[in-house]
């Protein structure tokens, strides 16, 4: 029986990840590796339709994924965009390339996280202006467009909801915003633009995340994000006060160190997370 189970697992793993080994071991020349990688064409798994009447409870939350955290390194590296061309890319390189080749069109102003049509950015030059600049005098790293090494994090918008039809708490990722170095003003960082996440799921599904535990067992960027395999903290959630941020009501106290203030912000983020978790747990209380 154990041998049968092991054999079945081996077949499944070989089916799902054989290309990762084959394109490396069977390549007649280095360019063959890239060709095999380009032909993944995995596609994203469709979400099931959810009727409004099936949603018992929901909460929209805004989070920040800090790329300085080790758990999020898979979204950051490689930071040298020229080191790997097709076989391995950072999340920013994938987004940037597909914005510039026209595959990503649902791009919205950095100040608009509600994705209003009036704030949709049209035209490649307008979009590139958010992450590009002719360097300013005195800039120690003059460059035209932001590279992967300039990205420090991602802001994401998603909704937690309880599906009473399936008696399950679920999460849907709605938007993502690259956040990084401002090339126009030295020493500053900024968000570049919001992207409607469902519109780029198929693109991210065709790019695999590096797995330092087993290079032959890799998931896509879409799998990583929709299954929340990252570390983040909440900086805002929908509320009666016009979706104010945590910083709007958790202010730094007189004499309080910046470290203590940051700790209080994190504690509030964790409180909101617990509130979401408690609702799920309370649904099963009698």
Image (cartoon, helix red, strand yellow):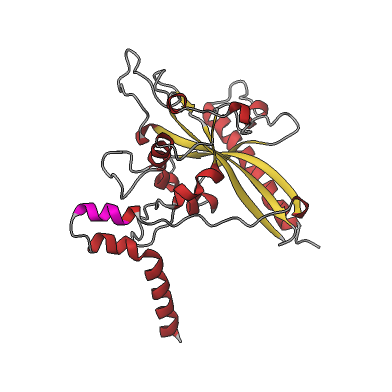
The residue sitting at 64% across, 40% down in the picture is: 61
Q: Is residue 120 left or right of residue 77?
A: right
The residue sitting at 34% across, 52% down in the picture is: 38
The C terminus appears in which quarter of the rendering?
bottom right
Residue range (magenta): 30-36
Residue 181: percent from left, percent from top: 41, 27
Residue 197: percent from left, percent from top: 54, 43
- Outermost residue on the right side: it is 286
**Quarter-of-image position of residue 270:** top right
Q: How many discs appear?
A: 0
Q: Main secondary structure of the magenta part?
A: helix
Residue 107: percent from left, percent from top: 52, 33
The residue sitting at 38% across, 39% down in the picture is: 93
Q: Check if residue 250 falls in the magenta segment.
A: no
Along the viewing direction, whichever of 23 and 236 lies nearer the viewer: 23
Q: Is residue 164 left or right of residue 180?
A: right
Residue 216: percent from left, percent from top: 34, 62
Q: Is residue 163 left or right of residue 135?
A: right
């Amino acid at each position: 029986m154990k041998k049968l189970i092991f054999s079945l697992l081996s077949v499944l793993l070989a089916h799902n990840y054989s290309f990762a080994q084959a394109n490396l071991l069977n390549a007649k020349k280095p360019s063959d590796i890239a060709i095999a990688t380009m032909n993944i064409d995995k596609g994203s798994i469709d979400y099931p339709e959810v009727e409004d009447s099936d949603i018992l409870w929901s909460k929209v939350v805004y989070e920040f994924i800090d790329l300085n955290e080790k758990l999020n390194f898979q979204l950051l590296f490689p930071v040298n965009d020229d080191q790997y061309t097709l076989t391995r890319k950072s999340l920013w390189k994938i987004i940037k390339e597909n914005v510039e080749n026209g595959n990503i069109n649902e791009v919205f102003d950095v100040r608009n996280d509600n994705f209003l049509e009036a704030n949709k950015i049209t035209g490649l030059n307008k979009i590139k202006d958010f992450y590009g600049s002719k360097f300013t005098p005195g800039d120690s790293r003059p460059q035209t467009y932001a590279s992967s090494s300039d990205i420090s994090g991602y802001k994401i918008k998603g909704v937690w909801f309880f599906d009473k039809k399936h008696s399950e708490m679920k999460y849907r990722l709605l938007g993502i915003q690259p956040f990084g170095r401002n090339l126009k003003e030295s020493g500053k960082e900024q968000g570049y633009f919001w992207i409607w996440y469902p519109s780029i799921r198929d693109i991210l599904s065709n790019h695999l995340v590096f797995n330092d535990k087993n290079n032959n067992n890799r998931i896509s960027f879409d799998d990583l994000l929709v299954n929340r395999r990252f570390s983040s903290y909440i900086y805002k959630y929908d509320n009666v006060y016009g979706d104010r941020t945590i910083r709007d009501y958790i202010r730094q106290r007189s004499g309080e160190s910046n470290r203590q203030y940051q700790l209080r912000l994190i504690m509030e983020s964790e409180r909101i997370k617990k509130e979401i978790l408690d609702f799920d747990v309370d649904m099963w209380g009698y």
